[in-house]
Image (cartoon, rainbow, N blue to C red):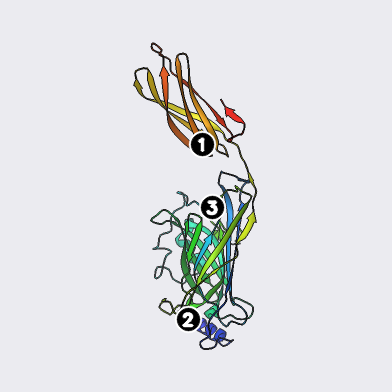
Amino acid sequence: MRGRFATLAACSATLLSLGCVSGATAADETAAADISMNPSAGGLFHELPRPVDWRVEAEVTAPPESNLVLPMKRIRVSFPKEMSFHPGPSMPVCPDSKVGPPPTYISEPPETIIARCSRSVVGNGSAKVYLAAVNAPGGPNLTDGVLVIFNGGRNRVGSPRLKVYGFSASLATGLYFEGVMKKNILLVDIGQLPVDSAVGELDLNIPGSDSPFPDRRGGDPRYVRAICADGQWSAFANFTLGRRDSDGSAAGPESVVRSPTVVKPCAGAAGSPRPKLLRDKLLRRGGGNLIYRVTVRNSGTASAHKVLLRARGRGISGRRLIRRIPPRTTKSVKVKVKRRTGTSRVPRFTLRSRWGPDGPRQGR
């Protein structure tokens, strides 16, 4: 362990001698963010979420005349509302006892950390760091940072939680931080790096299909899903920057830098509905009336609109309108059926629906 810290101290001293003068501060940082969401199987639809290969890149730089770069503390990335995370029940949650906040983790290479929760890997990534926050010529001076993303389940309010372990082989040093997806906003708290180093570039990938290391790829290709409703997606990020003392407390004021908004084109098909009667069940009788529960499944790729249920048969009448059934969902409704006195027939239910408000009819 002494050797690791000696290496870190030597690197820090070397970088500090490159131009970090006493009392120097960072200023006028700029930020950039980029996203990509490419369909992993088939195409996208206007309404039905489909799995995508997800990637976010974030970068903070200081002007050349600045000696330091303020370290990242937090990142708040606003993604398109059409995107969502889906921690599947088949993927186990990696507990804090195996991968979690200090002192749970230790500075071990990725393979050792992955072995603790090998079935919980969601994706991977990389990081580049300004060691000791020194704005050295050529940009980040530590470029071998690798990231492994684990399934952290959901927090107390049900938001998907990511657990990220980072490691630098050159410094033999690890780092743990977390991310939470609240609706369409990814919140990431960056832990403090040794000698208050600054993350210059961060790259997260789910499921991380581009990684040359198979065990660092996510085990659930359906973890991130998206639709393309309007032909484009937009995103931006806010970065909270600031220095910290050795105990993690603030060593000065914080600043917030926003990246420019990026707009990415996407292509989505309208899809088509496929409503189908699944079952009906008699709930109760009352005079000449019967109350049924009827269940309809839309197995299509678009919403079924104005689904009209009818009860048919000699001496039988009844109807119920379901205004909308989203794709791949099931709805159950109660239908009041009138039966003429003396009739013992069982009603036969049929349905008719619209593709959209003015689209072609679907029926059976």
Indicate the position of residue 122 as horizontal and vertical percent values.
51, 57
Q: 354 or 53: nearer the eye?
A: 354
Q: Residues within 10 Å of mark 2 (few under 14, many from 20)?
A: some
Q: Secondary structure at mark 2?
A: helix
Q: Between 172 and 58, which is closer to the camera in this rendering?
A: 58
Distance, label 2 to label 1, CA atoms, is: 62 Å
Q: Residue at the far front: name it.
A: 358
195 shown above or below 33: below
Alpha carbons under labels 1 and 3: distance apart = 21 Å
Q: Residue 5's mark?
A: 2
Marked residue nearer the N-terminal end (3 or 2): 2
Marks 2 and 1, the one that precedes in the sequence? 2
User: Which secondary structure lies at badge 1?
Assistant: strand
Relative side of 174 to 214, left or right? left
For residue 81, which numbered disc appears in the image?
3
What residue lies at 58% left-to-right and 48% top-to-bottom? 227
Q: Which residue is mark 1?
A: 324
Circle 1: residue type:
Arg
As drawn, 239 above or below 27: above
